[in-house]
Image (tube, helix red, strand yellow):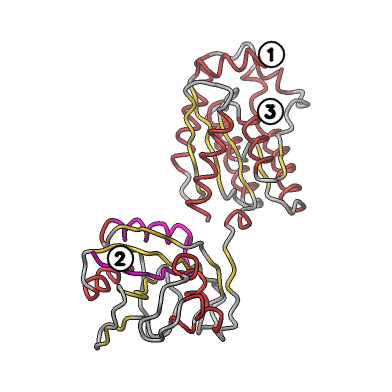
Amino acid sequence: MNVAFLCLGGNIGNRIENLNLTKKAISRILGKLTAQSQVYETAAWGSDSANKYLNQVIKIQTKLSAQKLLTSALAIEKSLGRKRGVTKNNDRTIDIDVLFFNSEIIKDKNIQIPHPRLHMRNFVLKPLNDIAAGFIHPELKKSIAVLLKNSKDKLSVKKYDGIKSLKYICIEGNIGSGKTTLAKVLAKKLSAHFLPEEFEDNPLLPLFYENKKLFAFPLEYSFLVSRFKQLNQTLKTEKKLVVSDYSLYKCLWFAKNNLAKKDFTLFKKQFKLIAEQLPKPDLMVYLNTTTKNLKQNIKKRGRKYEQSISEDYLNNISAQYDKGFAKINDIKTLRITVNTYHQKLEEASVQAINNFIKENFG
């Protein structure tokens, strides 16, 4: 079994997702991943591109020869959208460099191992030092730690903290799903600003449950305006990550269920105009549960005007949520299914969200 060190990097597209997809492909095609460095962010090396790179070094065990390893790595690059241009250091979705192959020195027309420039690049040396500080460069006869210490590369290489790139997360779900509780716990965990929906003061809400046909349109439009106002003000002024217990899309999904077809057509036009004025969430979490659980939670929290909500109404709203989330393709979404409510539910849900953030944002 051979041991190889590979450097992965890319500066366009969803960079962290591209790294993760590359590692999955490597594990499937090249060999077993046995170690990986932290992810680092750096400006483009040897290029004036404004797109910063994410880089990571991994260690694998492989049955492949060095030449087959390189050929297969190039095939993975291509499958993930890498386009090799005329410019040597052009932007790319992913780049896979073979740094070391055992302690062999291989030099021919198609392959050079060790990588001939790795000792001059901090974006390679820093992550390599995470997992192989004592590895001896077979040509230079120095350890990676010494090469990093002696490096003259001045390009800034910083550990990547994906959470800092997040600006807005929203927790969504049907009436009584527990989204406010989860959003509050998540905000505390992430040291974020918690943004609860302001709906209790809406005088149209109790009237709507008494006469849906008469009050549906004014209620939905008032929610659209108030939610936009609250989100717009907060997202413009808040410097910390924002975690809300609702999204503007909620307006569309409830309106689809509550309004007559003609009224919904008008509402949808207004929604699109208003939605364009807001930044989209970085992540939407859908807290999904059974109608039985929803009814129990609604009864438990004791809001008088909610007690008459029927199971059919909740089923219809859940259906709109399912359809709505299925149509979202430009925002990261996470569906959390809740079978039973228990003491450690929020803790488990926060852990699931944290894992998703790590995988998709770094």
Q: Which residue is mark 2?
A: 76
Q: Quadrant of the N terminus?
A: bottom left
Q: Nearer the viewer, mark 2 or mark 3?
A: 2
Viewer-side residue, 228 vs 36: 36
Q: Locate residue 9: give its quadrant.
A: bottom left
Side of 135 relative to 296 (left or right): left
> What crowding class fits label 1: few (fewer than 14 Cα within 10 Å), some (14-19), or many (20 or more)?
few
Q: Amino acid at mark 1?
A: Gly
* Residue segment shown in magenta: 1-27
- Tell me the residue at 46%/82% (across/down): 119
Q: Contact, CB < 8 Å: mark 2 with mark 3?
A: no
- The disc label shown at residue 219, or none: 3
The answer for how far apart the CA atoms under marks 2 and 3 are is 52 Å
Q: Residue at x 34, y 75 (%)?
A: 100
Measured from the top left, where is residue 70 in percent x and y? Answer: 27, 73
The residue beneath circle 1 is 302
Q: Amino acid at mark 2?
A: Ile
